[in-house]
Amino acid sequence: MKISLVTISFNQAAYLEQAIRSVLDQKYPDLEYILVDPGSTDGSREIIERHRDRISQIVFEPDQGPADGLNRGFARSSGEVFGYLNSDDMLLPGALARVREAFRAYPASDLVYGHGYVIDRAGDILRRCRSDRFNLRRSAYGNSIIMQQAAFWRREAFAAVNGFNVANRLSWDGEFWIDLALAGKQFHRVDEYWACFRAHEESITHNFHSGSGKGPFGIEQRRLLEKALGRSRSAGDAVAAAVTRVEKWLSDPRNLWLRVRGLFETRSRL
């Protein structure tokens, strides 16, 4: 099973080497690795060049943001299964082999995803990052989370929804899950740890999830709610958000227990 994995990179030289090595060190026999950089000026391109002989394709061209960069990368791909890794994140050893096995075990699934860890700048593990069982209604309220770094999907599913929304510069992955669900695609969660998300103040994800209900982050959250539910926001949505949060824990108590336990685990270095 050929896996096409895209890394988008823009001025993340401090972490890029680790990201690249976490992919190449998988030693997955049928990997197509594509690296997209629209114009880094911090030494990232020199890091990329050092690995040129092991990267399938390098795309050095301007783009309209991360979602556009990903679409450009996948447009050059030939794999059966797609995934992407931001330049400050990492795959865990053996992850791609486990992805292949998951697709073989669940052939009707269009998207398979697992769990991972949140790490800090130095690579120390801060906590577990457990994906939820995906539910479209709960996702509208931010209560059905998929760890993007541990998510992979079939080429046909990506084409069916025309890839990522280029206009979305904050949460293109969250919108992509919603688009797949609206298109009737099948999701399957695997109870394994496949990747790491690096938490730092400059990351888009950090800013999106810490944003208030005002400004661009709040506007984006409201737009995705309306897209997922097929209607305008209403006064009752504040209550619905609280209800869906309780719902997700009641429907998946093991996930809740492991998340709580993870808060008390000792930090370690990968």
Image (cartoon, grey):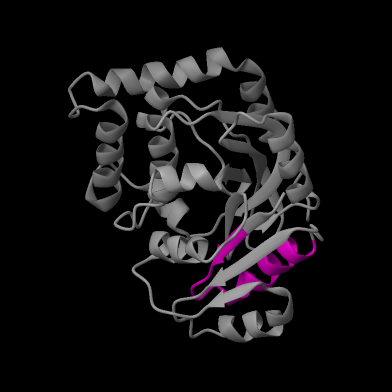
| 106 to 52, vertically: above or below | above
Q: Is residue 44 above or below residue 109?
A: below
Residue visible at 67% across and 63% down in the picture? 32
Image quadrant holding the C terminus, namely bottom right
Give the residue drawn at x 57%, y 56%: 84
Residue 216 visible to the viewer: yes
Q: Position of residue 13 (x, y in %)?
A: 59, 76
- Identify the residue at the far top of this view: 250
15 is within the stretch colored magenta: yes
Q: Quadrant of residue 204?
A: bottom left
Residue segment shown in magenta: 5-25
Between 113 and 219, the one nearer to me in the picture: 113
The x and y percentages for residue 122 are 68, 63
Horizontal and vertical percent position of residue 44: 57, 80
Q: Is residue 69 left or right of residue 33?
A: left
Q: Residue 209 appears in which quarter of the rendering?
A: top left
Please give the name of the residue rendered at 42% of the width and 43% of the height, measured from the top-left corner: 160
Q: Within the image, what quadrant is residue 238 found in?
A: top left
Q: Pick whichever, 226 or 164, lies toward us.
A: 164
Say left or right for 30 vs 11: right
Query: Would residue 143 appear left or right of 211 to someone viewing this image?
Result: right
Tally of numbered discs: 0
Compared to residue 250, the image places residue 230 above or below, namely: below
Is residue 85 within the magenta segment?
A: no
Residue 38, given in percent of the width and then of the height, sits at: 44, 77
Residue 141 visible, this orientation: no
- 77 in relation to 263, above or below: below
| Residue at horizontal 30 percent and vertical 49 percent from the top | 217
